[in-house]
Image (tube, rainbow, N blue to C red):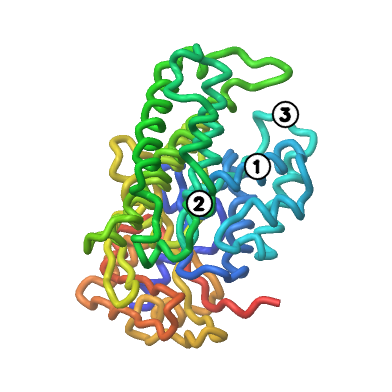
Amino acid sequence: MATDIKESVRPVDAAALLALLPSRPRMLALGEPTHGEDDLLDLRNLLFRQLVEQEGYRTIAIESDCLAGLRVDAYVTTGAGTLDEAVAHGFSHGFGASAANRELVRWMRAHNEGRPAAEQVRFAGFDGPLEITGAESPRTALTALHRHLAEHADPDLLPCTAATLDRLLGADDRWTEPAAMMDPTRSAGQSAEAAQLRLIADDLVALLDTLTPQLATAPPSEERDPSEEWDRARLYARTAVGLLRYHHWTADTSPGRMARLIGLRGAMMADNLLALAERGPVLVFAHNSHLQRERSSMRMGGVRLEWWSAGALVAARPGADYAFVHTALGTIRHRGVDTPPPDTVEGLLHALPDDRVLVDARGLAAALTGTPPAPRESPWFGYAPLDPAHLAAVDGLLYVRDVGPQG
């Protein structure tokens, strides 16, 4: 059995990773089983650099706020602002505190210096403007979309004025009330103003669609790039509609409320990924649960929630060019996650001498036929072990033997 496993293993680099796949995918998704470990992010950074330099990838998309990420992208492409500002304000979920994320942004800016736009690397967040405590106000996305259309469309076609939009939005803290995540009665998502805003957002998106020939194919000039403006407007459109929908269901009181919310988040992520892939190959980095093809699950407040992740939604699209590499870990000792049991997939790989390996997941699954490995249990809620039942649905497996405490 050990010989069979070794035949499925190879060293970790971009070329070996792509060799696991039938062709270079447009969306190459690399998962992580836990957040906050810079060892994993350093490895991600290395693979991204190799994919850029050797394989023609030009974009990295991470599990972070899609609107905040525009600030990082502006810095790495044009030098707007400073590295400190980009890292402090361009990431959500506290990810800006990571030294590895800071190094990623620094390297991207250094790589782009002096290069023409077509050869530059790009940064994107593909999550919605969502935090654990709730969703952001739809103000930024809605007002930016309205402003873009006001610059390009006949004023008579706009469904409302900017002043009306501002009045309906009201104070932003109406939307960002932290208590609303657990108490739907504290949410403004089903107020009369929110209902009107959903109709306005729908009309704005429809108007944007009708202007596609005008906005998507306009010739560039020294002052502006219409294709970039078009991509940005579509991002604002997706985000405005998605946020208003998310807020609406935050105010819901039915038993399916939390499952619906996490499913809506996955749908927002998927739409952002599909849009990013239109401009070229993308390395996607997020938690495994957001990228896997199988149905995802988690426990929240003692309740098991299940949903189809962004990766599952993207992979289900006809013609989707999507590959998923699952990352599994051996130990996170500073979190109480010790040596994996030998009868688990992680335990079998932990017995190998290498600190990190790439694994032909389907080959490994075939080698384990007849002796199904046991699922691993984690003593720490923040680490999600590999489900061995999912092994054959994974395009590749990255195994990291140990990760250590930071700093």
- Badge 1 density bin: few <14, some 14–19, many ≥20, Cα 10 Å: many
Percent position of residue 212, x then y: 45, 18
Residue placed under numbered mark 3 in the picture: 116
Point out the frontmost of discs 1 and 3. 1
211 shown above or below 321: above
SS category of the residue bearing label 1: helix
**What's under tag 2, amino acid-wise?**
Glu
Q: Give whichever of 288, 228 is nearer the camera.
A: 228
Percent position of residue 269, x then y: 42, 48
Q: Earlier in the sequence, mark 1 or mark 3?
A: 1
Residue placed under numbered mark 2 in the picture: 136
**What's under tag 1, amino acid-wise?**
Asp
Cα–Cα gap, marks 1 and 3: 15 Å
Residue placed under numbered mark 1 in the picture: 73
Q: Give whichever of 310, 56 is nearer the camera.
A: 310
Q: Earlier in the sequence, mark 2 or mark 3?
A: 3
**What's under tag 3, amino acid-wise?**
Pro
